Amino acid sequence: MAVVIVTMIMLIGLLSSNAVGARTVSDTENFLSNLTNGYNVNVRPVVEQLSAVNVTMQLYDKSIMEVDEVQGILSYTTGIKLLWMDYRLRWDPREYGGLQTLANIALSQIWFPEVILSSPVTGRGYLSESWSKARLIWNGIVLTIVLWVLCSVDINLEGWTDRS
């Protein structure tokens, strides 16, 4: 019998460092109100809607967290970095008090590629959650990093061990 637990958590520390580069709170508030004005998350970030959206995806094996041969549990963590360009999220930093980078933008507020992770052990899961965050850079680059944690009971040691 296999038990699968899949959990995704956001690596907030990396995304929130130097989160806001604006001089004042009103610069940031002004930018955020302009960002959401007329932005439709259902429209892909390309001028020609039949064109592909180039998304860079990097997978980082982080660590094996636990191996429990008795219970048959293998737990590991992998980091997934997604990077793409959204021309609708470009701005001139001079118009917003020098604001060049803004972190902790909810993925529900911007277009996000639908990424499905699938394996025989975990089944299928989507890579975005409502609490996930992104970092925006003034030239339209969007960056998000997600940690994927997998725990599975599916280790068969029959025939490989001698317990005499």
Image (spheres, helix red, strand yellow):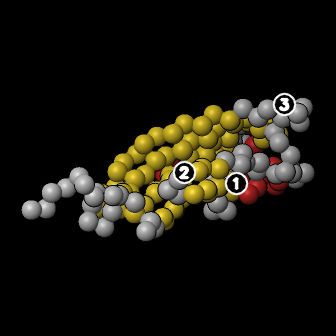
On the image, numbered disc 3 is attached to which residue? Answer: 51
Q: CA distance from mark 1 to mark 3?
A: 22 Å
Q: Earlier in the sequence, mark 3 or mark 2?
A: 3
Q: Nearer the viewer, residue 131 or 77?
A: 77
Mark 1 vs mark 2: in front: 2
Secondary element at image label 1 = helix
Q: Earlier in the sequence, mark 1 or mark 2?
A: 1
On the image, numbered disc 1 is attached to which residue? Answer: 107
Measured as percent of width and height from the top left, residue 20 is found at 62, 48
Q: Is residue 1 visible?
A: yes
Q: Residue at x 67, y 62 (%)?
A: 130
Q: Residue at x 46, y 40 (%)?
A: 60
Q: Are marks 3 and 2 in contact (CB under 8 Å)?
A: no
Mark 1 vs mark 3: in front: 3
Callout 3 environment at 10 Å: few (<14), some (14 to 19), or many (20+)? few
Q: Nearer the viewer, residue 121 or 56?
A: 121
Measured as percent of width and height from the top left, residue 63 is found at 36, 48
Q: Nearer the viewer, residue 16 or 84?
A: 84
Q: Residue at x 28, y 57 (%)?
A: 157
Which picture quadrant has residue 69?
A: bottom left
Q: The disc labelled 3 sits on which kind of residue?
A: Ser
Callout 1 environment at 10 Å: few (<14), some (14 to 19), or many (20+)? some
Q: The disc labelled 2 sits on which kind of residue?
A: Ser
Q: The disc labelled 1 sits on which kind of residue?
A: Leu
On the image, numbered disc 2 is attached to which residue? Answer: 119
Secondary element at image label 2 = strand
Measured as percent of width and height from the top left, residue 34 is found at 84, 50
Is 75 positioned to the left or the right of 45 in the image? left
